[in-house]
Amino acid sequence: MRIHQVAMGATDLDAIEDFYRDVLGARFIARYDPPGITFFDFEGVRIMFEAGSGSSVVYFWVDDIDAKVAELESRGVVFDGPPHVIFQDDDGIFGEAGQAETMAFFKDPAGNQIALATRR
């Protein structure tokens, strides 16, 4: 697994975009308003900022999400639900056009939200 995405809270998406794009030099990917989220790329690691959210989520990329879920469940991990489509990327904004981002969520022992992600 490798880190695929980190989700962070934000109070002002315009200021976030100015800072991460213009000051830090991150590649701006897209903004969706509503629901109030903006995406940046740092050399293959995506950062998503969500307006009004104070929580963070780490997303791990896996090639075979179903196999990884089964493996982690066999080790005692309890998922919030089965892998499911989060975004149908018909325009190729985040990768190959026509693929869907599929994710499965669980919590670590401290209650932090963790996700597995893939495209198919």
Image (cartoon, rainbow, N blue to C red):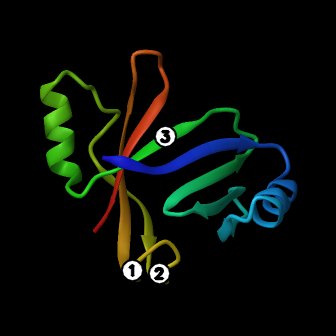
Q: CA distance from mark 3 to mark 1?
A: 22 Å
Tell me the amino acid under the disc marked 1. Answer: Glu
In the image, what residue occupies the spot 49% across and 40% down?
A: 58
Image side of residue 49 versus residue 93, left or right? right
Percent across and percent down for residue 76 are 20, 21
Image side of residue 107 versus residue 34, left or right? left
Callout 1 crowding tier (Cα within 10 Å): few <14, some 14–19, many ≥20: few
**Could you say whether the residue bearing mark 3 is in a helix, strand or loop?**
strand
Give residue 74's mark.
none
Give residue 58's mark.
3
**Could you say whether the residue bearing mark 2 is in a helix, strand or loop?**
loop
Q: Residue under label 2, please give it.
A: 92
Q: Residue under label 1, please give it.
A: 96
Callout 3 crowding tier (Cα within 10 Å): few <14, some 14–19, many ≥20: some
Percent across and percent down for residue 27 are 66, 69
Q: Disc 2 vs disc 1: Cβ atoms closer than 8 Å?
A: yes
Q: CA distance from mark 2 to mark 1?
A: 5 Å
Mark 3 or mark 2, which has the lower sequence index? Answer: 3
Image side of residue 77 versus residue 45, left or right? left
Tell me the amino acid under the disc marked 2. Answer: Gly
Q: Residue furthest top?
A: 110
